[in-house]
Image: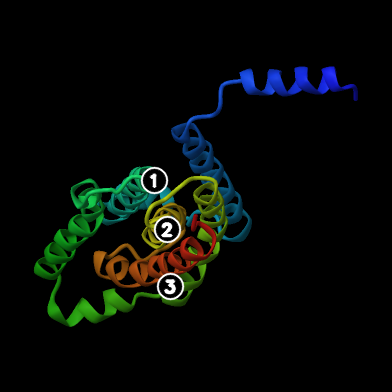
């Protein structure tokens, strides 16, 4: 290539508008949902009685919790991927999903006889839950870590942990459509442990790969 041609090509590239940080995260989030959905459909798929379960209260509520977790974590992740310091008040929305789940657990304990508490907590899909959510969330976490690596988080460890929360929320949303354990006691215990695995992995990945 001649020198003039190279200069013209570089000038043309420089004239193209750069993708905004919000645009990058939108692409990352959509790609994460697609990847998680593909893994979920290939490995598990929705439960056979999903139509009947949708008419109950506990089954749809799982999606309220997991959707809140994914949504609030993604918003926090966008803020944390910037170089400026993020105030604690901007991260307060992350408490929405745990708070909703805590209220549901309280209502469950009030409505169900004490003799049934442990049965509902243990459920029948404990091991599946602990394996499936981290497996489904691995792809989204990798995408979020890559996005963080190309951003400038001032607190990479925290940003990575929130990336794990977002990946866990997406994965748990898909898994909730397969899981036949709908009790808030089960969700509060095993979904939380499974999402925590991704959160820890995200913190390690953020600390390792998103430093600048």
**In whole angstroms, how far apart are the C-alphas of marks 3 and 1?**
41 Å
Q: Position of residue 102 (x, y in %)?
A: 17, 63
Indicate which disc residue 83 carries.
1
Q: What element carries label 2?
A: helix
Q: Which of 32 and 45 is in front in this view?
A: 32
Of the image marks 2 and 3, the number of the one nearer the N terminus: 3
> Coloring scheme of the render?
rainbow
Give coordinates of residue 100: x percent, y percent. Answer: 19, 55
Left or right placement of residue 109 versus residue 28 in this view: left
- Give the x, y percent position of residue 33: 51, 45
Q: Going 48% across and 30% down the picture, which residue do you hit? A: 20
**Residue located beneath label 2 in the image:** 156
Q: Which of marks 1 and 2 is nearer the N terminus?
A: 1
* Label 2 CA crowd tier, 10 Å (few <14, some 14–19, many 20+): many
Cβ atoms at labels 3 and 1 below 8 Å apart: no
Which one is in front, 52 or 65? 65
Q: Nearer the viewer, residue 132 or 59?
A: 132
Q: In which quarter of the image is residue 116?
A: bottom left
**Can you tell which of label 2 and label 3 is closer to the viewer?**
2
- Tell me what residue is drawn at x 18 percent, y 57 percent: 99
Where residue 18 sits, quadrant-wise, is: top right
| x, y percent for residue 57 | 24, 52
Q: Nearer the viewer, mark 3 or mark 1?
A: 1
Image point (28%, 75%), residue name: 121
Camera-side residue of 63 and 4: 4
């Amino acid at each position: 290539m001649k020198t003039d041609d190279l200069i013209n090509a570089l000038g043309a590239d420089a004239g193209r508008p750069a993708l905004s940080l919000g645009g990058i995260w939108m692409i990352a989030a959509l790609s994460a949902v697609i990847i998680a959905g593909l893994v979920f459909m290939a490995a598990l798929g929705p439960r056979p009685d999903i139509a009947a379960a949708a008419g109950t209260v506990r089954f749809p509520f799982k999606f309220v919790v997991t959707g809140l977790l994914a949504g609030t974590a993604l918003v926090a992740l966008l803020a944390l991927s910037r170089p400026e310091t993020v105030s604690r008040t901007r991260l307060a929305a992350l408490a929405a999903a745990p708070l909703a789940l805590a209220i549901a657990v309280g209502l469950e304990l009030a409505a169900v006889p004490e003799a049934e508490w442990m049965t509902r907590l243990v459920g029948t899909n404990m091991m599946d839950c602990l394996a499936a959510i981290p497996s489904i969330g691995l792809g989204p976490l990798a995408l979020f870590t890559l996005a963080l690596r190309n951003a400038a988080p001032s607190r990479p460890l925290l940003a990575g942990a929130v990336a794990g929360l977002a990946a866990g929320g997406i994965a748990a949303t898909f898994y909730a459509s397969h899981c036949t354990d709908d009790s808030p006691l089960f969700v509060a215990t095993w979904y939380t442990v499974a999402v925590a695995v991704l959160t820890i992995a995200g913190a390690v990945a953020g600390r390792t790969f998103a430093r600048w």
